Amino acid sequence: MSKKFLNVIDNQLSILITRIPHGETMDELRYDGQTVVVTGAGGGLGKAYALFFASRGASVVVNDLGGSFKGEGSSSKAADVVVNDIRAAGGKAVANYDSVENGDRIIDTAIQNFGRIDVLLNNAGILRDVSFKNMSDQDWDLVIKVHVRGAYKCARAAWPYFRKQKYGRVINTASAAGLFGSFGQCNYSAAKLSQVGFTETLAKEGYKYNIICNVIAPIAASRMTQTVMPPDILDNLKPDWVVPLVAVLVHSSNTNETGSIFEVGGGHVAKLRWERAKGALLKTGPTLTPGAILKKWKNVNDFSEPSYPTGVADFMTLLEEASKLGDNDQGEKVDFSGKVVLITGAGGGLGRSYALLFAKLGASVVVNDLMNPDDVVQEIQKTGGKAVGNKASAEEGDSVVKAAIDAYGRIDILVNNAGILRDKAFANMDDTQWDQVVAVHLRGTYKTTKAAWPYFLKQKYGRIVNTTSTSGIYGNFGQANYAAAKLGILGFSRALAREGAKYDILVNTIAPNAGTNMTRSIMPEEMVQAFKPEQVAPLVVALSSDKVPQPATGNLYEVGSGWHARTRWQRSGGHGFPVDIRLTPEAVLKAWKNIVNFDDGRADHPEDAQDGLKSIMNNMQNKSQGSSEKSSGEGDVDYQANIGKAKKSQADGTEFSYDDRDVILYNLGVGAKRTELPLVYEGSEEFQVLPTYGVIPSFGAAVPYSMDDIMPNFSPMMLLHGEQYLEIRKYPIPTAAKLVSYPKLVEVVDKGNAAILVSGTITKDAATGEDVFYNEMSAFIRGSGGFGGPKKGSNRGAATAVHQPPKRQPDAVVEEATTEEQAALYRLNGDRNPLHIDPEFSKVGGFKEPILHGLCFFGISGKHVYQTFGAFKNIKVRFAGTVLPGQKLRTEMWKEGPRVIFQTKVVETGKLCIAGAGAELMEGGKGAKL
């Protein structure tokens, strides 16, 4: 692995790794007498599967079309090479060259050659990455055809054999792009998350027949990933790290772990599950309004009392409880005057209730319905509202959106609601039933959204509410088609939300529960009558407004019976295996309790691809000589004694010189404008150094102690920059100087599974010996606790002060857009982290582009305080999130006596990047003259 990767120490990285030594060996897992079918097995992960299972006694069908990773062309060579390798090693294998669309032929190859099929690994895939505005129907259709229909066709062909023999194992393949959404991958994200809903349904239908079905989100080097990952990273992401988990899941000894989702790669394995907020329950009826829901928005997103469901909520009980409540506080009224709303499937049921409520609140409504939009249009017009009808399928997205443009000249809000049911047990489902449901729900949502997107981009405004289902989220008997389509919509929505955020296009997804003509076929009539669409409509309207608190996009909500709750992922802490030891299924099985443990305090809630890759990427420094071998002798190390010695150690001092050029470069790096002459022109009478420049001289200062001596299992990849404190001890700050920095160890706090290291650095003027700056950096280091140190840090006054924003409007707010070159410019101050400049490296870290250094937006925020309230003695911040170059920052400030309390948000996402921050002002009022 390259030196640049090993040296990454940044506040954007965190670790969730538990190091558990391996114990005694166990019997080898075998697959003798079984037949394993692997799709896409000509290379990468599929090839690794095929070679492994053949080596463990299975007969293998090596399927590969032999096309490019974009789905172009075909060749028999790829499959033949793998088959020859297996046979040369004494194994049994045959090749199949069909596309996964012809799944029946692939399965027939297994039956004709080996007489049975026991394991199906749906692995085949392609990429057609492109931003949504440039995506063609072919880009969409090819990805859906391979990933969604291909998985269905292979599983459907194998299912009768599985049922007859009362045995079967299926692995479907998702990805981080599907779980969290990925920029430029709306098609792939939709296809990959569809596999979760599909798998969960198969697991429920197959369990009584001993058919075990699971889904994995792997990260492994392949033809697809080599285009976005540098070689040194790919070397530690070999498919061999994924195979052992799959081997455990498909073994005959696994009879209970089914319908589960696993994240795997780079030696790390973790499980994911759905976590549902307690939510907000409101009285149903006329006082259930969008404003009433927004008034209770904190409750909607309150995860303090979560549940971990595997199915739909108890809506009947919720309805009974809601009926006992008093009238709802109405909150702030929402108004849609001047807005144009397009609702698909609005001729009845949920769509009709949405249309009526939007019209009531002033919107012009386009009522789309394949059968009869006119009745709802007339209903709106009779009450004085504005509406037009559109009779078309949602698949005809261009003509559907054209109706809005022709009638009103614009479109502001799109509610994708159209849907059909074709429920059937998977054993009896035919291709028509599958294709129709996917076409209407998934492709229809894509087509209408694609047609509306250019208008949203042009006006830099749009609101989209898409419709998933609890059948998709949790799976449901007889709805494999519907579950796949509906969860595919969620994957699509999450990716789309990422692309739209910078243009104020917000995308959210609901899972509604209501009685309609569509649900009448699966609900008792009394439930159809009780679960009214009017109980869902207010949330849809609220999400379409401009009043949703941040984060206002990319979320999933379950709704019905007056109840509204957000649902998100929870991920176990999982288990990290040493990357310098070959991983085996037996080792995975031995660590299984850790892999699936959500209750040991290590579980987290990943929200994006960056979060999804943290554990995997950070496990790359988990090596045997630094984990199991080292841990066996850790009892001989007296870390507390070493910490005591380190605190007394004196640094030799590291010199740092700067002049006016460096000052200007820093000021520009934190957003100074060319018109701000005191910051960018050395000839200005008021030329000055921004006070946050004080963090720069301590970059690279040599510390007088070894990290390995003061905590167990230290790795730079486990370090998260948590807080930064800076004192300016000399004003005015020299515009040129030779300085010397003296780092020291302040303290190490033992947090059990982690350590908090606080280092302090005094920076002095080399000529006079005067103190110029003092810095303290707090670093959170996963996996380095448990050494018996103090559980709580010391009180060091301003350096440890907790700044809570007052419960009032800010006294001052400054917004500033960063530039797309900000990260490249700031790194010239000494930041050599490739995460901030190398697109390939940032993609590996889960970022669509290089991100800003935390100290860069620290400098921008500090500049806002300085320019608004004047010079400060000290400043302290807690880093809370990431910033992409080009995003706008909003610093909110409250003056409390001699202090300014502040926080900084990313405007596009609404998320904090700096929290709990404060600055102590110099005496005498303002000192900034800019």
Image: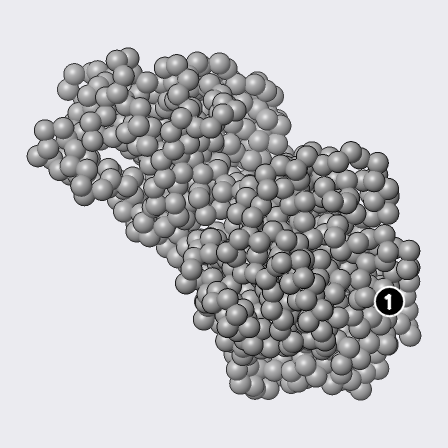
The residue indicated by pointer 1 is 521
Can you say whether 187 is above or below 882 in the image?
A: below
Can you say whether 295 is above or below 803 in the image?
A: below
Can you say whether 32 is above or below 279 in the image?
A: below
User: Within 10 angstroms of label 1, few (less than 14), some, or many (20 or more) residues?
Assistant: few
The reply to whether residue 850 is visible in this rendering is: yes
The residue that appears at 91% across and 59% down in the rendered structure is 524
The residue that appears at 57% across and 31% down in the rendered structure is 754
The location of residue 650, given as percent across then percent down, is 34, 19
The residue that appears at 17% across and 25% down in the rendered structure is 734
**Count the marks: how many?**
1
Three-letter amino acid code of the residue under disc 1? Ser
Q: Which of 80 and 261 is in front in this view?
A: 261
Looking at the picture, the colour scheme in use is one colour
* Image quadrant containing the C terminus: top left
Q: In which image quadrant can residue 49 be found?
A: bottom right
The reply to whether residue 278 is visible in this rendering is: no
> Is 814 left or right of 344, judged from the image as shown?
left
Q: In which image quadrant can residue 216 be found?
A: bottom right
Q: What element does badge 1 sit on?
A: helix
The location of residue 620, given as percent across then percent down, is 53, 49
